[in-house]
Structure formats: structure tokens, C-alpha cells
Image (cartoon, rainbow, N blue to C red):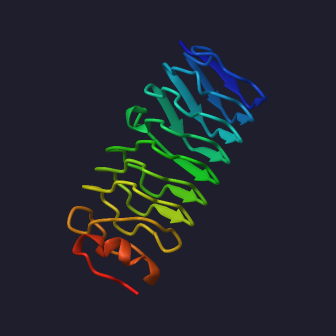
């Protein structure tokens, strides 16, 4: 049985490799905490908020994120694809997620606001109705993704092949069309 924590604020903590394992956090707030050394095992976050936290290189293979918000967090090279998929609901604002992986996840309706998403793996991910608001998607991979009704209107530096990515009713700005035409060697001015 996991240890249960409800409505607690955690500030300025550097967590060790196994410190959060076998714990369930509900309605908790983590501010300026560092999880980079963690190798998560049987950890659940429900209705939690992370502010100014670092997760870069953390091993989050056995984590449940249920209605979790990340604000101004550094989450580089993190593999979300092995997280618990039951009620997987996350939102990111002002975060750095470079080189992270969402491979094959269903993240329908997720919002990424003012995020750096450089070389993020969205391959075979369900991105239906995802909002990419003012995000840098340089070298992010979308092959075999479902991005129907996704909103890329204010984002930039993406290259998406409409032949390998489902984009029905996805929204793009006129300036971003070159990211959809790159494969055809067409020059847009």
C-alpha cells in the first residue's frame, strides 16, 4: 500500500533516487524542487502542481500523472511514454521539454503554452485537440501521429508531413505553412 499525502506544499527539495517511490500525492504543490536523480517506481500525482521544478533525465517509467500542471519546469530528456496511461492528464506552461518523448501516448486536449519542444518525440501520439500555443517545435517528430483539430497557429519551427500525420481540421498560421511543405522542396516567400 503506497504512502498517501494530501494537500501539502513542498519547497526547495532535492529528491534522492528512491525518495518518492511508493507514494501517492493528491492536491500537492511542489515549488523549486529537483527530481532529476529520481528513478520513479509506483508514484501517483493527482491534481498536483509543479512550479519551477527540474525533472531533466529523471526516469519516470512508473508514474501516474492525473490532472497535473507543470509551470516553468525543466523537463529535458524525459520519457513520458512509459507512464501510467489511465487518466493521463497533463498541462505545461513556460516549460522546457527538449528531447522528451510522448511516443504512442494519448494526450488529447493537452495544452503546451510558451514551451520549448525541441526534438520532442510525438511519433504515433494521439494529439487530437492539443494546443501548441507559442511553442518552438524545432525538429520534433510527428510521424504516424493523430493531430486532428490540434492548434499550431502560434507555434513555429515545426516540420510535419501531412502524408504520415493525420491533420484533419488542424489549425496553422499562414506563416507556418512552409513547415507542412518542406518535403516538397517548395520555397515559400
Q: Position of residue 79 (x, y in %)?
A: 43, 35
Q: Position of residue 139 (x, y in %)?
A: 40, 56
Rendering quarter of residue 44: top right
Foreground pick, 66 / 135: 135
The residue that appears at 43% across and 64% down in the rendered structure is 129
Q: Is residue 56 above or below residue 92?
A: above
Rendering quarter of residue 21: top right
Query: Is residue 152 shown to the viewer in this render?
Result: yes
35 displayed left or right of 43: right
Foreground pick, 149 / 103: 103
The residue that appears at 30% across and 72% down in the rendered structure is 182
The residue that appears at 65% across and 38% down in the rendered structure is 48
The residue that appears at 74% across and 24% down in the rendered structure is 13
Residue projecting furthest to the bottom: 189
Q: Position of residue 86 (x, y in %)?
A: 41, 37
Query: Is residue 168 shown to the viewer in this render?
Result: no
Q: Is residue 143 above or below residue 50?
A: below
Q: Position of residue 20 (x, y in %)?
A: 61, 19
Q: Is residue 142 above or below residue 40?
A: below
Rendering quarter of residue 84: top left
Q: Quadrant of the C terminus?
A: bottom left
Q: Is residue 138 above or below residue 71?
A: below
Looking at the image, how many numbered discs can be counted on the residues? 0
Amino acid at each position: 500500500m503506497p504512502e498517501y499525502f494530501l494537500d501539502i506544499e513542498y519547497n526547495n527539495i532535492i529528491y534522492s533516487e528512491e525518495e518518492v517511490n511508493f507514494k501517492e500525492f493528491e492536491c500537492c504543490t511542489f515549488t523549486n524542487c529537483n527530481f532529476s536523480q529520481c528513478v520513479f517506481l509506483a508514484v501517483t500525482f493527482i491534481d498536483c502542481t509543479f512550479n519551477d521544478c527540474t525533472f531533466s533525465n529523471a526516469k519516470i517509467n512508473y508514474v501516474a500523472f492525473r490532472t497535473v500542471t507543470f509551470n516553468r519546469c525543466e523537463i529535458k530528456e524525459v520519457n513520458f511514454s512509459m507512464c501510467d496511461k489511465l487518466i493521463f492528464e497533463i498541462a505545461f506552461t513556460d516549460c522546457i521539454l527538449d528531447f522528451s518523448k510522448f511516443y504512442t501516448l494519448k494526450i488529447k486536449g493537452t495544452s503546451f503554452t510558451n514551451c520549448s519542444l525541441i526534438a520532442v518525440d510525438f511519433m504515433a501520439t494521439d494529439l487530437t485537440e492539443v494546443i501548441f500555443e507559442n511553442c518552438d517545435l524545432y525538429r520534433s517528430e510527428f510521424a504516424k501521429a493523430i493531430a486532428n483539430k490540434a492548434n499550431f497557429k502560434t507555434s513555429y519551427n515545426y516540420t510535419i508531413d501531412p502524408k504520415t500525420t493525420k491533420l484533419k481540421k488542424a489549425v496553422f498560421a499562414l506563416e507556418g505553412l512552409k513547415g507542412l511543405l518542406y518535403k516538397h522542396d517548395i520555397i515559400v516567400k
